[in-house]
Image (spheres, helix red, strand yellow):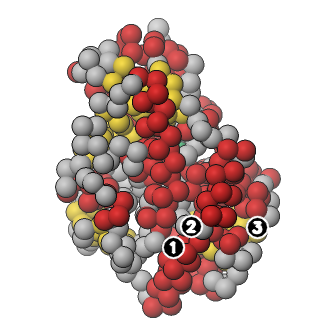
Amino acid sequence: MKDYFKQYPDTKGFFKEYGGAFLPPDLQEEMNRITDAYHAISKSHNFISELRSIRKHFQGRPTPVYYCKNLSAKYGGRIYLKREDLNHSGAHKLNHCMGEALLAKYLGKKKLIAETGAGQHGVALATAAAYFGLECEIHMGEVDIAKEHPNVVRMEILGTKVVPVTHGLKTLKEAVDSAFDAYLADSENSLYCIGSVVGPHPFPMMVRDFQRVVGIEAQEQFFEMTGEQPDHVVACVGGGSNAMGIFSGFIEDEDVELHGVEPAGLSDKNGEHASTITFGKPGIIHGFKCYLLQDEKGEPAPVYSVASGLDYPGVGPEHSMLKDIKRVKYQRANDKETIDAFFELSRLEGIIPALESAHAVAYALKLAKENPQKSILINLSGRGDKDIDFVVDKYGLPKE
Ligand SMILES: *Cc1c(COP(=O)(O)O)cnc(C)c1O
């Protein structure tokens, strides 16, 4: 996989057959403008040095790599975590939000616009907007607003305007439409900011590039600690941004096995999981081509995961390609395994993981048991404070 990043995506934003941009002409024009600007600005000395300074002084990077001695003693293997939970605001999402907001500043934009489902992307973008003194408008389904009250309050404290979306099912899909409309109505002054390695070109490329810092740091840190590369790298996959971040540090080295973990939810029945790569077929959603969970009519199917950050019926085009070329293996963890892993990491290492990240931990524990000689690096994409009430109300504390 030499020169991987020069090859993918191609100039039209394709990762083999996936990705691209399937958009109405007015939106396509906007995406072309963003692509050109990104290519010009992201390589400039000023942009790179400002982003570097933000990562160090505002976000608190580099985040550490940590050896889990208690977990390793119990499960076997040598288990390590890349601690994105210690990134400012508690997850990896700020890595690309700061990059997108910095791009907005260089483009002279005044406002950031996005949708949010569970609110994590909204909070990260609201944080970035506050830092840069930009306005921020987050579109959110009314159903999600009611469910995710703490994140709504966080966004409002940070000075963001939360726009309730009241049509259709009043959840993420309608919020995307509403945010796109708002952006098109004012594209002169605003930048649309996507929350993962999804959407039309250039977003899957841009978001991956901004997340690459995770993999670059992790590769250096792991080598410094152990004198070798990890045997396995594991990350959860919703849209796929945290996974692309850490994978990118190792993708050119085929000795390192990469595992993306999808939510297996409650069962393999339609609507009870969000295992897009495992069960999906190629299709188009939100302006790009990827593996997609579809109903009989080819429409995006309903999805479910105990971790709301993972319940998306599509997945990044790059992951779709990496599945086909077999560079990454896509695995699954169900709700029960995830909740068990949530408590194991909390009790054995003193680290409460986000439920999204706990999917990666759950699969890594299985892998460790089966491979006691191997080293495993997990991307701990976020911290679990947001999930504690939900977990304890729904599952109680483990009986031991
Ligand atoms: C949003 C989120 C995810 C899922 O998004 P990806 O783009 O797949 O990384 C994973 N972990 C945490 C903590 C999140 O907030």
CA gap between label 2 and label 1 equals 6 Å
Q: Quadrant of residue 282?
A: bottom left
Task: Name the amino acid type tagged 3.
Answer: Leu
CA gap between label 2 and label 3 equals 19 Å
Instruction: Looking at this view, name the residue that lies furthest to the left.
Output: 325
Instruction: Looking at this view, name the residue that lies furthest to the bottom.
Output: 25
Q: Residues within 10 Å of mark 1 (few under 14, many from 20)?
A: few
User: What percent of the width, then of the height, locates residue 143?
Assistant: 58, 58
Q: Which mark is residue 39?
A: 1
Q: CB atoms at circles 2 and 1 under 8 Å apart?
A: yes
User: What percent of the width, then of the height, locates residue 60?
Assistant: 67, 40
Q: Residues within 10 Å of mark 2 (few under 14, many from 20)?
A: some
> Is label 2's Cβ within 8 Å of ligand 1?
no
Q: Quadrant of residue 137?
A: bottom right
Task: Name the amino acid type tagged 1.
Answer: His
- Please tell me whether mark 2 sits on a helix, a strand or a loop: loop
- Please tell me whether mark 3 sits on a helix, a strand or a loop: loop
User: What percent of the width, then of the height, locates residue 310?
Assistant: 44, 49
User: Is residue 7 found left or right of 307 in the rendered image?
Assistant: left
Identify the residue shown where x is 46% and y is 36%: 220
Identify the residue shown where x is 56% and y is 24%: 351
User: Is residue 186 found left or right of 115 in the rendered image?
Assistant: right
Task: Name the amino acid type tagged 2.
Answer: Ser
Query: Where 171 sits versus 10, above or below?
Result: above
- Please tell me whether mark 1 sits on a helix, a strand or a loop: helix
For disc 2, the marked residue is 42
For disc 3, the marked residue is 134
